Amino acid sequence: MGGKADFRPRHRPPPPPPVDVTIPPRPLPPGNASLTQILPGRGIDGGFVTANSGVTGDRAFWQLKIGLNVAAIGCRGVEESTLVSAYNDIIKTHGKVIKSTEKSVIKDLGKENKNNGIAPRDRLSTQLFNYFAQPPAQRAFCARANEIAQIVSTTPTDQLVEQSPAHLARLDEPFKQFYEAYAQYQADVIAWDAKYAPPPAVMTTPMPATPIGPAITTGTTPVAPTTAPASPTGNP
């Protein structure tokens, strides 16, 4: 004979403790930048294209000088005194190159716009001032501007224009680095929202009520009325 079945209650293992899910804070823009920052387009090499990209010759020195001017006016970190001193030396030592390159820029802009070039020069100057003054990149920009200003202030005058494209590209790097950081922030926000943000509420529109109209027949057999017609004489 087989043994008796054991119907005694058995103890089930306790359920596992709930797992605490720590939600990281939503990413923030780099350098306290605006949530609506607009990034420039990218070039064939994948890098961002700025107002300083591919600039050469006299215009490169002219734009470099504007960048250093913005730095001398606005940078107030540890490099302030040496930066301002170097910029003043550039103005004194390379004054002839500053004037000649600006005349060249005005002439070229005049040909492009079919005017005397003054108004286009002013617009471009304003654009460059605003570009170099972007707050999120200022800390790195000021340090780089101080470094370049020391070099330019001691460069022989006849080598200034030749070396300017390389200096301008290096002065532009802090802004491109900021743009790259902002692009990464945008990607991080998309990933965070996909993982942690609650799904948007689904808005449903109720179906409109179907009006009840008279009965419609599709056959050839007439439909009998549901009530008897009134007698012509008024008698039942």
Image (cartoon, grey):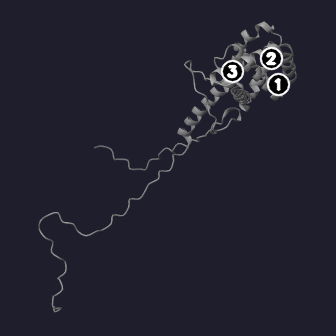
Give the residue drawn at x 72%, y 16%.
Answer: 104
Which residue type does callout 3 highlight? Glu
Q: Quarter holding the N terminus?
A: top left
Q: CA distance from mark 2 to mark 3?
A: 15 Å
| Local secondary structure at mark 2 | helix
Residue 172 quadrant? top right
Q: Position of residue 175 (x, y in %)?
A: 68, 25
Q: Quadrant of residue 162?
A: top right
Identify the residue position indicated by label 2 in the image. 149
List the residue tagged with mark 1.
72
> Which of the marked residues, 3 or 1, is nearer the chain's N terminus?
1
Image position of 105 (left or right of 195)? right
Q: Residue at x 67, y 19 (%)?
A: 108
Give the left or right position of residue 108, taking residue 217 as reference.
right
User: Counting residues from the N terminus, which is met first, the one under dot 2 or under dot 1?
Assistant: 1
Nearer the N terminus, badge 2 or badge 3?
2
Three-letter code for the amino acid on which mark 1 is drawn: Ala
Q: Residue at x 56, y 39 (%)?
A: 193
> Local crowd at mark 1 within 10 Å, few (<14), some, or many (≥20)?
many
Alpha-carbon span between mark 3 and mark 1: 18 Å
Q: CA distance from mark 2 to mark 1?
A: 9 Å
> Which residue reaches farthest left?
221
Q: Are marks 2 and 1 in contact (CB under 8 Å)?
A: yes
* Residue 188 percent across, percent down from the top left: 59, 33
